[in-house]
Image (cartoon, grey):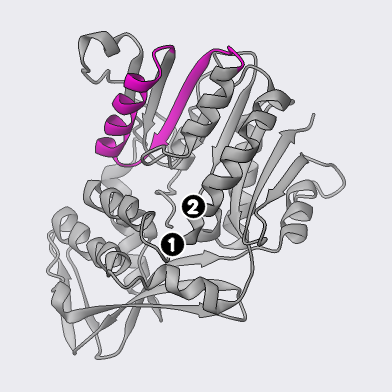
Amino acid sequence: MAERSRSRGHNSASTTVAADPPLASRLTLRALQTGQASETDGADVIAGLQQTPKVLPSKYFYDDRGSQLFDQICHVPEYYLTRTEAHILKTYAPAIAEITGPCELVELGSGSATKTRFLLDAYGDRNQPLYYRPIDVSGGALKQSALALLQDYPTLSIDGLMGTYEAALAQLPPATLPSRMLCFLGSTLGNLSPTQCNRLFAQVREALQPGEFFLLGVDLQKSPQQIEPAYNDREGVTAAFNLNLLRHLNWRFQADFDLDQFRHHAFYNHRAHQIEMHLQSQCDQVVSLAILEFSCLLRRGETIRTEISRKFDLAALRSQLEHLPWNPDTKVFRVLEAWVDQRSWFGLLLCQIQS
């Protein structure tokens, strides 16, 4: 639903996380450091709250509690995205494994890595080695999912990277297998503006070698009546997920957001073909973030946008991938396959990096 943090980093620190002895030799988790956190941490919050209308970066969804809530969202009846993408992956994972051959899997925003299992099964069924590099900003989610995978896949090795997309892509170690596939699933691409999409595609291109692969899952354009309930589930899990962003800011920056004075509000923007998630102030209030030495006034009814979720036209996205603006005459990505479900609600694209 929401992408993980997006601030570029250049330096890394490696720490091996202790695991059960039978698993320790197959697991490494490394915390990536930007080397600039003390200077820039929270600057994006101040900048967003000074805008009109106000916005907050969706990266702050993903503390450990936010990651748990997102996993719950994936199982509510209204949230069709996870089920639909999982069905496509289950159906076509064997074809993906056949096309790529032995391939190290790298996943941006890995979360619980539930859908990744379809790929691991497909490579395992072909007796190919299994090596997985999950990338996530939540260290708790990263460790929990890694240990679960290692229990179920005795030949799997995991090198987890805890940090932002940019930091991980900039510091991605050389592949351990003959090839590599970078996976960006869950339509997390929809959380990026068109400019941010192009920037991410450029970073993916720089991180991969010619001939390596990029697997991309996207939610497709359809009736708002089919889309909006996924972000307004009856159980209120998405509302709790949205409000948890404020709880995270309260902890991280000693803020005093009163969660009872905000309401979850999500709607489809027809012009932009995107869902927008907002937090609406229920009264006039002043909010302070002590660590940032910043405060702001929110009027009754004023909203803070916390996320967009763009819905894609498959043909337009394919053209965007194959003819990127910084080199429009050269096919930087070649789209090998584009699979959709029976209702054409969701798309999965397998791309290959061109020389």
Q: Is residue 48 visible?
A: yes
Say which residue appears at 58% left-offset and 13% top-offset.
128
On the question of residue 187 being in view, the answer is no
User: Where, by quadrant of the figure, is residue 59 drawn?
Assistant: bottom left
Q: Which residue is mark 1?
A: 79
Please determine whether, in this image, residue 62 is positioned above or below residue 335.
Answer: below
Q: Could you tell me residue 139's position as x and y percent? A: 27, 36
User: On the rendered structure, is 349 left or right of 309?
Assistant: right
In the rendered image, residue 348 lying in the magenta stretch gets the answer no
- The residue singled out by tag 2 in the image is 83
Task: Give above or below for 340 relative to 273.
Answer: above
Of residues 81 and 285, the one drawn nearer to the viewer in this rendering:
81
Instruction: Judge left or right: residue 289 versus residue 145.
Output: left
Q: Is residue 92 left or right of residue 274?
A: right
Picture coordinates of residue 41 (x, y %)? 29, 50
Instruction: Establish if 234 lies above or below 109.
Output: below
Q: Amino acid at mark 1?
A: Tyr
- Whether pointer 2 and pointer 1 mark residues with C-beta atoms closer than 8 Å, the reply is yes
Q: In the rendered structure, which segment of residues is drawn in magenta?
A: 126-155
